[in-house]
Image (tube, rainbow, N blue to C red):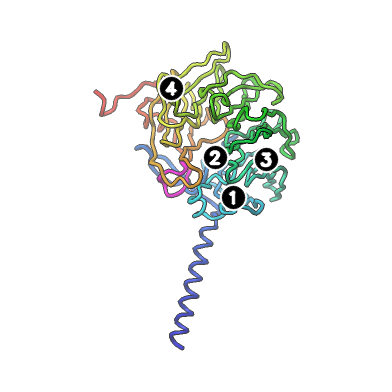
Amino acid sequence: MDRRWSAIVIAAAGGFILVILAMQDLRTPNAVIWEPATMAGQGIVRADGLVLQEARDGVLWASDGFSIYRSEGERGFLKVHDVRPSPGVIWAAYSRTLRKLLGLEEAIEVFPLQDDLVLVFVGGEIHRVDLGKGDSELVHRLRYFGKGEGRGVMPFGITADDAGRVYYGEYVTRRLADDETVALFRSDEDGRNFEIVYEFPALVVRHIYAVQWDPYDRVLWMGTGDGDEQSRAGFSKDFGETFLWIGQDSQDFRTVNFVFAEDHVAWLSDTVEPPARVFRWRRDNWEVQRSPGNLPGHGHFLQAIGGGFSVGTTAEEIASLWLIGPDLEMDKIMEWPLGELGMSGFSTIRLARGHLESSEWLYLSPLRVEESKPAIYRLSRYAAFAAAGQDALSGRRLMTRDEP
């Protein structure tokens, strides 16, 4: 009897421990604080476990699995909502362990419409969430999502114009049939419904990478890929009804996001053959300028940080962060060793949606790198300059110990 009871007690204790571990694996914290850290020798802060989403009007949005977080000013993050997707394979993202194993850190895309109203792209669905009331409504289903289909939408494939219309572009990775199309969707009712506003003929493009509103010319930009003949970049003056292409049929115009300035539009090419570069399209004469140097790996995200400078990231072959100067010269800030790629297939450094040029802070999320879990890094623009060996005030290259 003693041995039997001992076995029962041991089994019960083991089961209890497993339940506790499972709860920890499924649970997301109610709050996440900024903690001191270093990056490339510079003092920074980081918020562990979070994936960067959007920065707008002093508010920073983030996610952890299906949980939405918000931070105002320089304070930490508070959880504001838990999204409940319909049953499916995406439910694996409830588990922190499976998110890492399967590369599902970006399980949701959070797009704020107002302070207490957000759209959430999750599991091939769009949920319209009223954070004030705690209500969530499924308003739309994506045509493409899931294993063999693709993630449905890219981080910079969602935008809104200054009249409140909301847009998203379809992102599908499989080869489409001869009668299947890729389309731009628009909502004229504050995200309550979506309809096709622009549709590419079958096989013309593989997917839409970027859909972004240009606040200077008040036009809608779109970028597509993947092959030479499928890659193009251009803008619409009639809210997505028709487009003027500034370039197409070239990997130079394959990009995952645009950066807007008063006199130009810039991007990184998402390619390794030919090598990735920085491009700049001038508004006055439509001239396309290219950087003298190349980036290692696929060029991914780009963000202006003021004074003619920007930061760019690379993905897949190498996950790194670069400082890009007014003459499109490039200096590396930081490189991350690649980690477990999961089913996603590549590492990347994610930057925030939103116009952040006037902010003193730079935010970024390394994903599927050697770090044990996702995190949001916050560093000052001065730290970014210093890490790249640049003087933040003069913009001049500083001499390092390795240079004569």
SS under mark 3: loop
Viewer-nearest of discs 4 and 3: 3
**Mark 1 and mark 4 in contact (Cβ < 8 Å)?**
no
| Mark 4 residue element | loop
Cα–Cα span, label 4 and label 3 = 40 Å
Looking at the picture, which amino acid does disc 2 mark? Gly
Q: Is residue 58 visible?
A: no
**Closer to the camera: disc 1 or disc 2?**
1
Q: Is 2 included in the stretch rendered in magenta?
A: no
| Earlier-in-chain disc, 2 versus 4 | 2
- Residue under label 1: 66
Which dot marks residue 325? 4
Mark 2 highlights which residue? 73
Question: Callout 2: 10 Å neighbours few (<14), some, many (20+)?
Answer: few
Q: Assess disc 4: are there few (<14), some (14-19) or many (≥20) residues with their C-alpha within 10 Å of its C-alpha.
A: some
Give the distance between the C-alpha atoms of the residues marked 2 and 4, in whole angstroms: 28 Å
Residue segment shown in magenta: 366-375
The answer to whether mark 2 and mark 4 are in CB contact below 8 A is no
Amino acid type, label 4: Gly
Residue under label 3: 143
